[in-house]
Image (cartoon, rainbow, N blue to C red):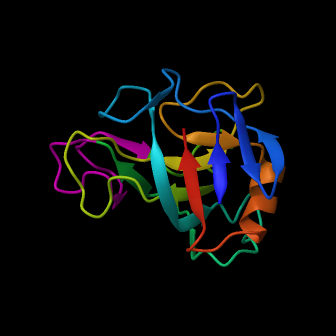
Amino acid sequence: MIKISKSGFLTLNRVKYKCSFGKNGFTKNKLEGDLKTPVGIFKFLNCYYRSDRTLKPLTYVPCIKIKKDMGWCDDPLSEDYNKPITLPSKFSHEKLYRKDNMYDIFLVINYNINPIKKFLGSAIFLHIANYNYKPTKGCVSISKKNLIYLLKNINTDTKIKIG
């Protein structure tokens, strides 16, 4: 099990790695746009990666190559809320093919996905942290090096405990 603590560390196999999480901390009552990371125990669904910037990760988690027209819908008014989408879209969304490197590799955390409940939060990922571990909009982030290591040591049964 991977653990995320309020002290800013991700723990895997008794080793701690610096991480960041939502700007407004953790919550048991996640709402879209609250800048909080949901508390709970979750599995990982898929790994997404940019093949122009990194090799396909060595992992037992299914991997999806990110293309320029890929996004993730964060608009509760859309039928595609909290799902991957093809861009362009008239609904609010996150681009997966970004200029920065934060989504060069990321894992989808199985939060509010089965079933999806409108307004309860979307696009909760474990992704690459920026250079100073700036807080996220609700995701968890770690260094690219540590994310690559983590991917080698997890599978779809691995759980992440947040909070």
Residue 108 percent location from the top left of the image = 50, 58
> Measuring 64% from the left and 36% from the top, which residue is drawn there?
5
On screen, residue 35 above or below 58? above
Tell me the residue at 39%/52% (across/down): 72
What percent of the width, then of the height, locates residue 98? 57, 44
Relative to the observer, which residue lies in front, 142 or 16? 16
- Quarter of the image where one finds residue 7: top right
Q: Residue at x 33, y 41 (%)?
A: 121
**Could you say where residue 129 lies in the image, as x and y percent from the top left?**
70, 38
In the image, is residue 76 part of the stretch drawn in magenta?
Answer: yes
Q: Relative to the observer, which residue lies in front, 116 or 1?
A: 1
Residue 119 x/y as whole percent: 22, 39
Vertically, is 128 above or below 58?
above
- Residue 122, can we see it? yes
Looking at this rendering, what residue extends furthest in the front direction? 14
Does 86 appear in magenta? yes
Q: Main secondary structure of the magenta part?
A: loop
Residue 161 vertical position relative to residue 163 in the rendered view, above or below:
below
Would you say residue 104 is visible in this rendering?
no
The image quarter in which residue 99 lies: top right
Magenta part of the chain: 75-94
> Which quadrant does the N terminus fall into?
bottom right
